[in-house]
Amino acid sequence: MDEDEAAEIHEHLLDAAYAIDEARAAIFTLGKEDQGGFAASLEAIETILHSKLLRAIYDRFPGLIEHDEFPEISSALRWDQVRLPPSISEAQVDQIIFSVMVPQWRKMARMIGDALGRCEEVGLPISAEVVAARIQALVEADRLVSQGDLRRWRFSEVRLKG
């Protein structure tokens, strides 16, 4: 195998890794009773893909190693799946999110972290996944703008409109 052949195989393996990550996100939207078998099987496939197939390519052709980490999905939670506690309103979550947003592009991960910090300051007990789901909903409602797949927090960006 020469480097061009290895690069082609590498591209297909990365496509497979992305597809597995998408499947994982879909599986985690299932109920707990349905997740078990799927998640374990998918993990076994992913382990082989990364530790054997990609490792074999990288051992022979280290120039193919991605410089950035693989952009895995951080959360697939959608706002319509969120059930806020009665003591927390959607408007309160929005107020927190807009209080940390800026007109410049910022990593989704940073904005989630900033919003969580503000939530702690005011005593709102919500998770990073809930904040991320709300940011995605605000983007879909055209109240914020984004770049990239917002489910991949470290590989997407968000900002205020304008």
Image: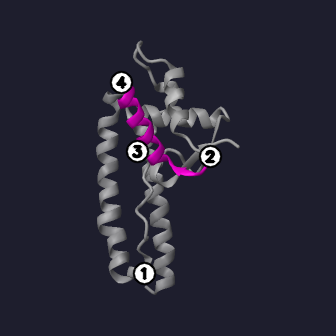
Residue at image x 47%, y 85%? 3
Circle 2 sits in a helix, a strand or a loop, which is it?
loop
Amino acid tagged 4? Gly
Callout 1–callout 3 Cβ contact below 8 Å? no
Task: Tell me where residue 144 sits by quadrant.
Answer: top right
Q: Which residue is depicted at the point 53% across and 50% down?
A: 106
Q: Earlier in the sequence, mark 2 or mark 1?
A: 1
Q: Residues within 10 Å of mark 3 (few under 14, many from 20)?
A: some
Looking at the figure, which quarter contains the N terminus? bottom left
Residue 49 covered by magenta stretch: no
Q: What secondary structure prevails in the magenta region?
A: helix
Q: Nearer the viewer, mark 3 or mark 4?
A: 4
Distance between mark 2 and mark 4 Cα atoms: 26 Å
Report the span colored magenta. Answer: 104-123
| Badge 3 amino acid | Arg
Which residue lies under the disc numbered 2? 103
Which residue is situated farthest in the top direction here? Answer: 86
Q: Name the residue under label 3.
A: 24
Residue on which disc 1 sits: 63
- Give the labeled residue for mark 4: 123
